[in-house]
């Protein structure tokens, strides 16, 4: 019933005269609205509040959550009413209730009015159909058709707008039999059928035939009755000859009553079950048909009841169909039938449904037998085990003959008897339970971990319990192994200093981040499990593009290796080195990406310092060489070393300490010091040595050696070498200058002494000139030599004092003449002197003493070169020299 609005309720009252009033009661028991008959026509009053009895029933129905009828209620003016309560719920919550008042007086009047005075008396009782007390609501009396034989009580079960009623017809005299009815028609259809049969049965008083000419009015009324039902109704005489068939029958069989002969037999299109095994088509052999049908009539008569069976009907056109056939015998006397009423119902679809149901049940049984889920079925009351599938037998090890027929709780496959008690109490309370963890025992004693489910099932008014369980023993063992493996993983991942993470592509986010992430950064990793992009806001702005591209590569399943800066909770920037690699399943489908991130801040700082140091070393003019003394050589040299030594980086990295020293050091003592492992970790050494380049050219160098221990197995040497060739040359020049200064100082002192010695000689020459005038030539030569010696002394003094001398114009020929006189007097006679002076020699601007000394030195060098004597030639010429 669906009455959604007040207007809809008014339409129902106008349509059905038996409904006098409709009320809507809210959940709190208040009448919200009321609709009744038009003003002046209502006989039920106009109460807006519930009576005490209705309030009590309202509360009962609200709690029981199902519709109900009230007890008999007498309203004003003597009206008898049936009150129908129907609750409404929405999503389990009580919304309210409809209350409908039915008046049954007019209904009974319509039911009894057609019965004539010639019928026998009878009574009609109307009661609530589903009422547990079957309380009588109204009783009326009438008359029953004459000639009824059986004293039977018939009951109609009908519904009007979901309102159930039971109508009882009880004859008070003469035996009477009424055909069975299933209640599918409305109550008015039942009343019309009753009084139509009252008139129809009067025509069965004749023994052999029905006179149609005398029943025109009755036939018209009977057709009106038959047209009002969807069921096939056929009336025959006692021998099976068809008297009448309603339109539903004509539609079902394809035969029209008007086209049939007067003695057309029912077997023309109907197979009568066990009497007629084959279909009778157009058989009008009266003897066979009448005798066989008469046997059936006698059988029905002797059992004192109708006969119903499923048989086959062959329509005039089309294939045969299955029908249920009900024979209702109308008796003229206690031993002879007056006629037969047949009611046919097409059950082809029903039988097909039943067949499909049986097929489904067979398939269901096959599915249960082949199901991997262990299944057992017991009776709810006795707990008797009536079914086990093969999976249950296989998993428990018990045979069917060992357990079928026994009580479920008494079997030895329960690991704990307390569980059985809990199962029974839960099923009694709730009717089902799901996935209980229980322990089952195999026939061999092995304990099995299982998930057990059970539920009540009602089948044909019987209640059964279906048990199903899944063996979780192996899964339990796997869960234990998985848990232990997970614990080991947590221990490893939680204690390594690196951050271990897993990114699942299906979820598009991180599914695991080890505790080291929070330990290093101080950040909570929880937001990263929801969206990986949350991490990007902690990345240094300069590294955003690099990190974003890495995320894209990770989602694409590519391996990545990046170094970026992440901001810690305290605001500092930490360098992280992150490496990832894809994970594929057995089908090479990408499922996840795993990665390891390390805090490389200290390493980056060390690299920064190292890079700065290398930059400084590379900028130095000095040669810097780092030699690794271990088995794996990681040598380094700056560009100055490569340039000076004439080698490249590859050659340097492949060298050991021994090979380097042998290739580039000349001092074997230095090599021995390098090869000797020093006892002091701070050992250093500085010395000058000779080094050589790749071409073998040596050069002086100042070498600084530093010993650098790395660990117990390895150490390094740091060599800083400076090419001091220019410095050595400068030092040599400085030494020569120093020597010259010393010589000048010595020469100055000697010049003073010589000058003091020459002064008396000059004075003596003047004395000798006056004393020995005849020897003037020798005295002149002596004077010239003394003066020349005095000039040489003056030159030495000028050189010692740093003076340039006294320049004046000098004729080269005169210089050569003086030189020849000195050579002739002082040189050995074995040396012959020859001079040549070109004509027109110009004067030269020089210090006469200095140029004379130069010429003397040249001649002295020539003399020293010819100890055995020889020819000394002196040529003086003018020559142009290109500069």
Image: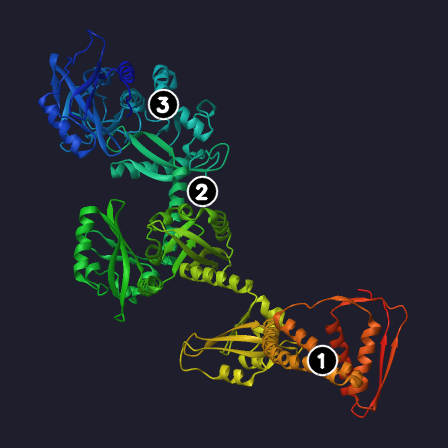
Q: Quadrant of residue 205?
A: top left
Residue at (34, 61) in percent of width and height? 391
Residue at (14, 15) in percent of width and height? 47
Residue that mark 2 sits on: 278
Tag 1 secondary structure: helix
Pointers 2 and 1 in contact (CB under 8 A)? no
Quote the CA–CA distance across marks 3 and 1.
197 Å
> Label 1: how many residues lie within 10 Å, few (<14), some (14-19) or many (20+)?
some
> Label 2: how many residues lie within 10 Å, few (<14), some (14-19) or many (20+)?
few
For marks 2 and 1, the one nearer the N-term is 2
Looking at the image, the residue that sits furthest to the front is: 771
Residue 835 in sight here: yes
Q: Which of these two is toward me, 399 or 80? A: 399
Residue that mark 1 sits on: 766
> Label 3: how many residues lie within 10 Å, few (<14), some (14-19) or many (20+)?
many
Looking at the image, the residue that sits furthest to the right is: 839
User: Residue 80: where, in percent of width, then height?
Assistant: 15, 18
Q: Is residue 775 left or right of residue 482?
A: right
- Badge count: 3
Image quarter hosting the C terminus: bottom right
Q: Which of these two is toward me, 545 or 330? A: 545
Camera-side mark, 3 or 1: 1
User: Residue 803: where, in percent of width, then height?
Assistant: 65, 68
Q: Is residue 105 left or right of residue 346?
A: left
Camera-side mark, 2 or 3: 3
Pointers 3 and 1 in contact (CB under 8 A)? no
Residue at (37, 15) in percent of width and height? 216
For marks 3 and 1, the one nearer the N-term is 3
Residue that mark 3 sits on: 226
Residue 862 in sight here: no
């Amino acid at each position: 019933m669906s009455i959604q609005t007040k207007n809809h309720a008014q339409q129902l009252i106008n349509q059905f005269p038996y409904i006098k009033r409709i009320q809507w009661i809210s959940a709190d028991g208040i009448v919200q609205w009321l609709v009744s008959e038009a003003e002046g026509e209502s006989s039920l009053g106009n109460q807006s509040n519930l009576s005490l009895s209705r309030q009590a029933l309202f509360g009962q129905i609200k709690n029981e959550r199902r519709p109900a009828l009230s007890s008999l209620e007498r309203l004003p003016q003597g009206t008898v009413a049936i009150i129908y309560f129907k609750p409404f719920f929405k999503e389990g919550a009580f919304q309210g209730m409809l209350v409908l008042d039915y008046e049954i007086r007019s209904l009974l009047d319509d039911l009894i009015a057609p019965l004539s005075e010639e019928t026998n008396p009878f009574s009609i009782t109307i009661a609530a159909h589903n009422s547990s007390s079957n309380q009588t609501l109204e009783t009326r009396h009438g008359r029953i058709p004459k000639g009824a034989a059986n004293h039977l009580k018939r009951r109609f079960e009908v519904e009007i707008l979901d309102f159930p009623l039971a109508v009882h017809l009880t004859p008070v005299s003469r035996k009477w039999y009424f055909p069975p009815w299933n209640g599918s028609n409305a109550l008015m259809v039942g009343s019309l059928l009753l009084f139509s049969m009252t008139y129809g049965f009067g025509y069965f008083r004749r023994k052999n035939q029905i006179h149609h000419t005398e029943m025109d009015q009755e036939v018209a009324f009977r057709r009106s009755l038959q047209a009002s039902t969807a069921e096939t109704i056929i009336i025959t005489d006692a021998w099976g000859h068809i008297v009448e068939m309603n339109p539903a029958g004509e539609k079902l069989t394809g035969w029209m009553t008007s086209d049939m002969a007067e003695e057309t037999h029912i077997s023309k299109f109907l197979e009568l079950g066990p009497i007629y095994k084959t279909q009778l088509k157009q058989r009008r052999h009266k003897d066979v048909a009448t005798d066989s049908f008469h046997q059936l009539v006698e059988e029905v008569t002797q059992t004192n009841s109708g006969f119903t069976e499923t048989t086959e009907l062959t329509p005039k056109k089309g294939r045969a169909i299955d029908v249920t056939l009900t024979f209702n015998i109308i008796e003229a006397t206690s031993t002879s039938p007056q006629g037969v009423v047949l009611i046919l119902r097409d059950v082809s679809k029903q039988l097909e449904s039943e067949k499909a149901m049986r097929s489904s049940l067979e398939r269901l049984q096959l599915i249960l037998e082949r199901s991997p889920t262990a299944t057992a079925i017991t009776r709810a009351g006795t707990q008797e085990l009536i079914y086990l599938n093969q999976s249950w037998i296989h998993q428990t090890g018990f045979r069917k003959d060992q357990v079928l027929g026994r009580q479920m709780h008494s079997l030895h496959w329960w690991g704990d008897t307390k569980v059985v008690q809990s199962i029974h109490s839960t099923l009694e309370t709730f009717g089902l339970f799901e996935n209980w963890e229980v322990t089952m025992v195999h026939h061999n004693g092995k304990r099995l971990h299982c998930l057990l489910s059970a539920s009540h099932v009602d089948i044909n008014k019987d209640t059964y319990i279906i048990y199903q369980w899944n063996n979780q023993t192996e899964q339990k063992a796997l869960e234990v192994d998985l848990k232990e493996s997970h614990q080991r993983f947590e221990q490893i991942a939680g204690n390594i200093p690196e951050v271990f993470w897993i990114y699942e592509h299906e979820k598009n986010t991180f599914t695991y981040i080890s505790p080291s992430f929070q330990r290093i950064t101080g950040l909570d990793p929880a937001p990263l499990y929801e969206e990986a992009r949350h991490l990007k806001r902690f990345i240094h702005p300069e590294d955003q593009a690099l990190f974003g591209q890495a995320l894209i590569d990770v989602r694409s399943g590519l391996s990545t290796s990046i170094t970026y800066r992440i901001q810690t909770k305290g605001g500092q920037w930490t360098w992280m080195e992150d490496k990832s690699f894809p994970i594929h399943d057995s089908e090479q489908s990408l499922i996840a990406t795993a990665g390891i991130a390390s805090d490389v801040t200290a390493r980056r700082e060390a690299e920064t310092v190292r890079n700065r140091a290398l930059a400084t070393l590379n900028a130095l003019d000095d040669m810097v060489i780092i030699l690794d003394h271990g088995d794996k050589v990681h040598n380094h040299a700056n560009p100055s070393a490569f340039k000076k030594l004439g080698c490249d980086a590859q050659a340097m990295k492949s060298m050991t300490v021994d090979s380097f020293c042998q290739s580039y050091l000349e001092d074997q003592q230095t090599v021995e010091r390098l090869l000797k492992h020093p006892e002091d970790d701070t050992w250093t050494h500085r010395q000058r040595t000779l080094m050589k380049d790749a071409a073998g050219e040596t050069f002086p160098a100042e070498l600084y050696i530093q010993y650098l221990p790395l660990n117990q197995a390895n150490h390094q040497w740091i060599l800083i070498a400076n090419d001091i060739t220019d410095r050595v040359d400068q030092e040599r020049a400085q030494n020569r200058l120093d020597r010259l200064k010393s010589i000048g100082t010595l020469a100055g002192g000697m010049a003073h002494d010589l000058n003091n010695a020459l002064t008396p000689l000059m004075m003596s020459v003047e004395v000798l000139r006056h004393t020995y005038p005849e020897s003037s030539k020798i005295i002149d030569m002596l004077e010239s030599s003394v003066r020349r010696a005095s000039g040489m002394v003056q030159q030495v003094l000028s050189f010692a004092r740093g003076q340039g001398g006294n320049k004046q114009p000098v004729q080269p020929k005169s210089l050569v003449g003086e030189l020849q006189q000195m050579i002739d007097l002082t040189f050995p006679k074995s040396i012959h002197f020859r001079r040549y002076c070109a004509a027109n020699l110009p004067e030269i601007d020089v210090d006469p003493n200095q140029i004379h000394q130069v010429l003397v030195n040249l001649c002295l060098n020539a003399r020293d070169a010819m100890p055995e004597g020889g020819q000394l030639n002196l040529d003086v010429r003018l020559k142009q020299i290109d500069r």
